[in-house]
Amino acid sequence: MQDGSASPLSPDAPSSPSPVEPGEVRSPEADIVSTHVLVPEEQVHKLRELARRTRIHQSEYLREAVEDLLSKYGRIPKPEGES
């Protein structure tokens, strides 16, 4: 389903941003995609309160958390026998 009618949560939805046309300037937000996660209710309340107190969007905190996890775990090791 490549007609643009796929839901953002659909497996048929494109997972990468559209290519940049020559001369086109893209903002950093153009490379951000939507995702859906289930989070315990207590954590949601704490995150909302933190965002309210600090005036930093919840999405910024979540992107920072993902970056921290990727930095912490680095690359996924290849299975033995592969180089």
Image: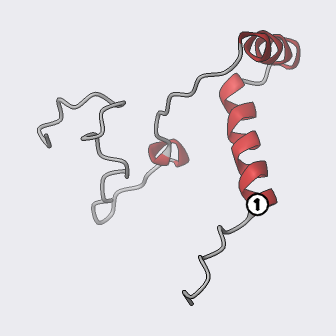
Q: Is 68 above or below relative to 76?
A: above
Q: Nearer the viewer, residue 18 or 27?
A: 18
The image quadrant of residue 37 is: top right
Q: Give the x, y percent position of residue 5.
A: 17, 29
* Residue 70: quarter of image: bottom right
**Residue 39 falls left or right of residue 83:** right
Q: Can you say whether 44 is above or below 3 in the image?
A: above
- Identify the residue at image location x=24%, y=41%: 12
Q: In which quarter of the image is the C terminus?
A: bottom right
| Residue shown at 78% from the left, 9% from the top | 45
Depth check: give the residue in front, 44 or 77.
77
x, y percent for residue 52: 81, 11
What amino acid is labelled 1 in the image?
Tyr
The front one of 40 and 6 is: 40
Q: Is residue 15 toward the left or the right of residue 72 in the image?
A: left
What colouring does the structure picture have? secondary structure
Q: Quadrant of the N terminus?
A: top left
Q: How many labels does the image show?
A: 1
Q: Where is residue 31 in the image (x, y as percent from the top left)?
A: 47, 48
Is 28 on the left or on the right of 48, as rendered?
left
- Left or right of 32, for residue 66: right
Look at 76% across and 60% down and name the residue there: 73
Indicate whether 5 appears above or below 28.
above
Q: Residue beneath label 1, please?
A: 73
Identity of the residue drawn at 87% across and 19% down: 54
Q: Is mark 1 on a helix, strand or loop?
A: helix
Crowd band around label 1 with a 10 angstrom C-alpha radius: few (<14), some (14–19), many (20+): few
Tell me residue 63's x, y (percent).
Answer: 68, 40
Is 33 rendered above or below residue 42?
Answer: below
